[in-house]
Image (tube, rainbow, N blue to C red):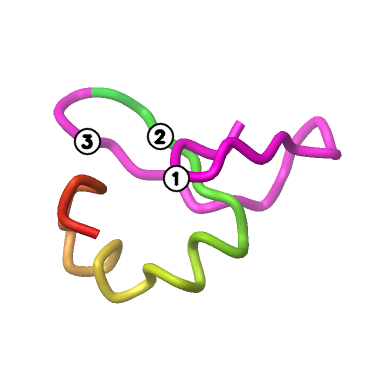
Amino acid sequence: MCALCGTRAEDSQPTWTFSVENGARRYYCEKCSREHLRAIEGRLDAQWW
């Protein structure tokens, strides 16, 4: 499930963005990944998006 919007993966192994924030694994769907790419690459926690 996408950590930001709650979208569920249709495939058993989606090609989503993976991030570790405060020791927790988070996955982001393609839509959210594209919208927040700079923040993800800048290693900003999701609370800053």
- The answer to if 5 sits in the magenta stretch is yes
The amino acid type of the residue labelled 3 equals: Glu
Res 41 → quadrant? bottom left
Give the residue drawn at x 35%, y 44%: 19
Against 10, residue 30 (above or below) is below
- Badge 1, how many Cα within 10 Å: few under 14, some, many 20+? some
Q: Say whether residue 9 is left or right of residue 40.
A: right
Question: What is the magenta range?
Answer: 1-23
Residue 8 percent across, percent down from the top left: 71, 34
- Quadrant where the C terminus lies? bottom left
Residue 1 picture location, percent across and down:
61, 31
Residue pushed farthest top?
A: 24
Name the residue carrying label 2: 26
Confirm or deny contact between disc 1 and disc 2 (CB under 8 A).
yes
Q: Which residue is mark 1?
A: 18
Q: Is residue 21 above or below residue 30?
A: above
Which residue type does callout 2 highlight?
A: Arg
Task: Give the camera-side residue of 11 and 6.
Answer: 6
Badge 2 or badge 3: first in the primary sequence: 3
Decide: marks 2, 3 in contact (CB < 8 A)?
A: yes
Amino acid bearing label 1? Phe
Asked which secondary structure carries label 1, the reply is strand
Q: Circle 3 sits on which residue?
A: 21
